Amino acid sequence: MTHEGPGREISPDARLRSAVLGGSLPPVSFARVFLLLAALALPACECWPKRSRYTRFDVTNYRGELIASWVAEGRYTSFGDGFSINAVQRTSAPPYSQTSRYPDGWRTWVRGPHIRYGRCFKPSWIQEVEQRGFFRMTDASPH
């Protein structure tokens, strides 16, 4: 221990802390450190359901006739003549219209002469899958 002024002793640790941090730190209990780390780690936990944004992309020809319609989950990236998306659904145009569903998502590109896009609601079939907790290929029950 060294003396600093009349009747005051400062430990070498306190002196080092003062020199490095610009002042002395109050003592911190283990409980406070644990609570701080728990609060920082909690948002990374998958305790809460994932909230995603859904975007609909309509690809049309030059006359405005629909070629295909896509529903994408999450973020999308614009590039050159299209978008890079994580598709969850694709519907082809009439006369032989087909809807393809991708419950786990499918990383793909949307390209075409004219693309309209905007926010949309979560497709109803995804809500049903989330409620059931699994994906069933057909709605017909095997029982």
Image (cartoon, helix red, strand yellow):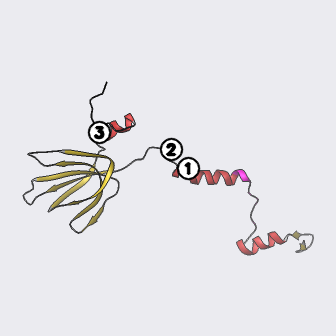
The residue range painted magenta reads 24-31
Q: Is residue 28 magenta?
A: yes
Question: Which element type, helix, strand or loop, lies under badge 1?
Answer: helix
Q: In the drawing, does residue 40 fall left or right of residue 28?
A: left
Task: Name the residue that disc number 3 marks.
Answer: 125
Circle 1 crowding by C-alpha within 10 Å: few under 14, some 14–19, many from 20: few
Q: Are marks 1 and 2 in contact (CB under 8 Å)?
A: yes
The front one of 46 and 104 is 104
Separation of marks 3 and 2 at Cα, in angstroms: 23 Å
Q: Residue furthest front?
A: 142
Helix or strand or loop: what does disc 2 sit on? Answer: loop
Q: Quadrant of residue 132?
A: top left
Name which residue type carries label 3: Trp
Please tell me whether residue 120 belongs to the stretch shown in magenta: no
Question: At which x and y percent is residue 77?
Answer: 31, 63
Q: Considering depth in this image, is 98 or 30 the residue closer to the camera?
A: 98
Residue 47 - label: 2
Residue with the mark numbered 1: 42
Q: Residues within 10 Å of mark 2 (few under 14, many from 20)?
A: few
Image quadrant containing the C terminus:
top left
